[in-house]
C-alpha cells in the first residue's frame, strides 16, 4: 500500500510540474503538439526511472559507504547527463522524427530540474530501493500526464479565437495556472 | 598532503566518470548513425541560415531531401544559382530551366509619412506589432503600413529599409523567405512570383474599405473604381472586396502597364524596382 501511495502522490497530488513547479521549460516548450509532448514524456520517464534506480545505488553503496555525500549533486548530474546522451543516441537512430520534433528540448532534459529534483527528493525522503524506483517512474508518468493534458488543451485552443493580447505565451501560462489549480483538487487523496 | 576525504572523493568521481564514459562509448559504437555523406557535403554548401525559404524546416532537412530526390537542387532561395550549381555538381545532376521568374516580397501600401493621415499621436513602443495590439495604431486607415519597421528588423538579409515610413525592399537581397510576411501585423507584405523580364508593378494598397471611406482615410488608396480592369491588361487586374488586385501568374513580359498607371485616379498602381534594376540606377 505504501508503494501505491508513493506512486499516486507523485502522479497526482504532488505532480512535479503542477505542484512543485519543476520541469516547467519542456512543459511549456514541447506541449504544443500531442505527438511531441507524448514523446518527450516517455523520454523523460525513461530518464527519470533509470536516474532513480542508478542514483539510489550510487548514493547508498558509494557515497554513503565512503561518507562523501557532499558529492551527490555532481554525481547525480553526471548520471543524468549520461542517460540523456544515451536516450539521444537511441532516438536519433531509431526514431529520427521524434528526435527532430523534440529538438533542443531533448538535451535540455539534462538540466531539467524535475530530474535532478527527483534524485534529491529521493535522498531527502530516505526511500529504499523499490520506493525510489516507483518514485522515479511515477514522477515520469506524472510529467507525461501534465504534458499530454497541456498539449490537448493547447491543441483545442489553437482552433479558438483567442483575444489578441492573450495569444501565444500568455494564454499558455494562464492554462498552466488553471491546470495547477485543478490538480489542487487531488490533495487529500493520499494520507500524508 | 591530501586528506583521505579528498582522495576518496577524487577516486570516486574518477571511477564513476570512467564508468559512464565507457558505457556511453559502448552505446555510441552500437547506436552509431550511418548518415549519407552526401547530406553532410550538401549541408556544407548550403548557406546554413535555416531561413525556411525552401519550404523545409532548415538546411539539414533540405540537404536530406535534395539527396533523396524529393527537392530539386535549386531549392535554396538565398543560395541562388551558385549554390544550386555546386549541389548539382555533388549529385551529378543538371539544372534544367533558366530562372525566368523571381519570388519577391511586395509591399501593398503606398502612403509615405506625408500622405499618412493620423488620428493622434502614438507614444508607445515603436513596434508595429505593439501598436496594432494595443491601440490599433494611430493611422486613420486600418489597413495601412504603421511604419515602425518590424519587417525591416525581422528581415534576415537586411533587404528591407524603412524610407519615409514605408518599407523599401531591395530586390537583389530579398530571398522571399517570408519572415516579413509573418511579422507584419497587418498582412501588407505578400510574396509574389514575377516575371523577371516583365514590368514590376503593384497595387500599393491593401484597404478593403469602401471608396468613400478610403477617400476620407487616404490620398493614395485604392477606391476600387475598376479603371485598371478596363484599360488592362484586363486578365491581370481584378477588383474584389473593394480592392484591385493583380494576378502575377497572368502577366507576361510584354504586358503594358503604362496606361493603368497613368489612369489610376489615386495613383496607387506603381512601379517598383526589379532585381538588377536597383543596382543599375545607382
Image (spheres, helix red, strand yellow):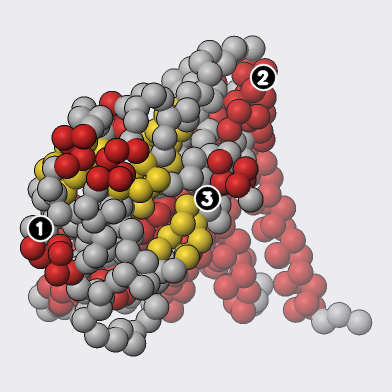
Q: Position of residue A120 (x, y in %)?
A: 46, 73
For numbered disc 3, what is the local secondary structure?
A: loop
Q: Is residue B68 visible?
A: no
Chain name for mark 1: B
Residue at screen point 67% across, 41% down: B25
Using the numbered discs, state the Cα–Cα distance from disc 1 to disc 2 in whole angstroms: 57 Å
Location of residue B245 by image quarter: top left
Q: Are marks 1 and 2 on the same chain?
A: yes
Chain name for mark 2: B
Using the numbered discs, state the Cα–Cα distance from disc 1 to disc 3 in whole angstroms: 32 Å
Q: Is residue A130 left or right of residue B228?
A: right
Q: Do the residues bearing badges 1 and 2 touch, measured as CB atoms within 8 Å? A: no
Which residue has dot 2 on it?
Answer: B90
Which residue has dot 3 on it?
Answer: B170
Residue in front for this viewpoint, B2 or A60: B2
Q: Are marks 2 and 3 on the same chain?
A: yes
Q: Position of residue B83 (x, y in %)?
A: 63, 30
Vertically, is B37 above or below A184?
above
Q: Residues within 10 Å of mark 1 (few under 14, many from 20)?
A: some
Residue at screen point 34% across, 38% down: B258
Q: Is residue B135 left or right of residue B195?
A: left
Q: Quadrant of the C terminus of chain A?
A: bottom left
Q: Are marks 1 and 3 on the same chain?
A: yes
Residue at screen point 66% across, 35% down: B44
Q: Do the residues bearing badges 1 and 3 touch, measured as CB atoms within 8 Å? A: no
Q: Position of residue B108 (x, y in %)?
A: 31, 52
Using the numbered discs, state the Cα–Cα distance from disc 2 to disc 3 in whole angstroms: 31 Å
Which residue has dot 1 on it?
Answer: B211
Residue at screen point 31% across, 74% down: B130
Amino acid at each position: 500500500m505504501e508503494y501505491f501511495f508513493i506512486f499516486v502522490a507523485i502522479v497526482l497530488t504532488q505532480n512535479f510540474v503542477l505542484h512543485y513547479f519543476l520541469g516547467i521549460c519542456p512543459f511549456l516548450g514541447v506541449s504544443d503538439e500531442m505527438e511531441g509532448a507524448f514523446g518527450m514524456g516517455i523520454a523523460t520517464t525513461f530518464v527519470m526511472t533509470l536516474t532513480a534506480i542508478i542514483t539510489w545505488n550510487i548514493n547508498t553503496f558509494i557515497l554513503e559507504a565512503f561518507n562523501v555525500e557532499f558529492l551527490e549533486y555532481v554525481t547525480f548530474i553526471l548520471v543524468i547527463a549520461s542517460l540523456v546522451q544515451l536516450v539521444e543516441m537511441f532516438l536519433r537512430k531509431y526514431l529520427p522524427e521524434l528526435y527532430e520534433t523534440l529538438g533542443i528540448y531533448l538535451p535540455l532534459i539534462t538540466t531539467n530540474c524535475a530530474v535532478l529534483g527527483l534524485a534529491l527528493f529521493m535522498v531527502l525522503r530516505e526511500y529504499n530501493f523499490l520506493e525510489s524506483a516507483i518514485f522515479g517512474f511515477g514522477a515520469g508518468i506524472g510529467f507525461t500526464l501534465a504534458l499530454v493534458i497541456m498539449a490537448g488543451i493547447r491543441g483545442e485552443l489553437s482552433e479558438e479565437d483567442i483575444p489578441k493580447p492573450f495569444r501565444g505565451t500568455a494564454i499558455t501560462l494562464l492554462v498552466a495556472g488553471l491546470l495547477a489549480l485543478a490538480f489542487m483538487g487531488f490533495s487529500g487523496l493520499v494520507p500524508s | 598532503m591530501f586528506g583521505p576525504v579528498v582522495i576518496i572523493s577524487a577516486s570516486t568521481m574518477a571511477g564513476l566518470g570512467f564508468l559512464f564514459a565507457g558505457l556511453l562509448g559502448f552505446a555510441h559504437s552500437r547506436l552509431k548513425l550511418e548518415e549519407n555523406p552526401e547530406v553532410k557535403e550538401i549541408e556544407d554548401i548550403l548557406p546554413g541560415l535555416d531561413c525556411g525559404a525552401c519550404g523545409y524546416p532548415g538546411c539539414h532537412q533540405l540537404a536530406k531531401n535534395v539527396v533523396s530526390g524529393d527537392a530539386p537542387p535549386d531549392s535554396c532561395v538565398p543560395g541562388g544559382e551558385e549554390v544550386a550549381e555546386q549541389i548539382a555538381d555533388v549529385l551529378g545532376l543538371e539544372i534544367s530551366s533558366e530562372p525566368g521568374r523571381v519570388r519577391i516580397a511586395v509591399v501593398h501600401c503606398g502612403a509615405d509619412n506625408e500622405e499618412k493621415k493620423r488620428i493622434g499621436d502614438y507614444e508607445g513602443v515603436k513596434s508595429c506589432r505593439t501598436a496594432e495590439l494595443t491601440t490599433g495604431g494611430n493611422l486613420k486607415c486600418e489597413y495601412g503600413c504603421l511604419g515602425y519597421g518590424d519587417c525591416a528588423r525581422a528581415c534576415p538579409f537586411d533587404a528591407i529599409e524603412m524610407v519615409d515610413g514605408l518599407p523599401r525592399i531591395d530586390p537583389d537581397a530579398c530571398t522571399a523567405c517570408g519572415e516579413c510576411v509573418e511579422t507584419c501585423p497587418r498582412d501588407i507584405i505578400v510574396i509574389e512570383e514575377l516575371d523577371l523580364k516583365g514590368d514590376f508593378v503593384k497595387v500599393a494598397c491593401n484597404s478593403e474599405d469602401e471608396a468613400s471611406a478610403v477617400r476620407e482615410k487616404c490620398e493614395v488608396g485604392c477606391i476600387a473604381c475598376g479603371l485598371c480592369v478596363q484599360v488592362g491588361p484586363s486578365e491581370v487586374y481584378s477588383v474584389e472586396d473593394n480592392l484591385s488586385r493583380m494576378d502575377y501568374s497572368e502577366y507576361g513580359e510584354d504586358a503594358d502597364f503604362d496606361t493603368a498607371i497613368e489612369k489610376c485616379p489615386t495613383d496607387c498602381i506603381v512601379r517598383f524596382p526589379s532585381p538588377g534594376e536597383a543596382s543599375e540606377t545607382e
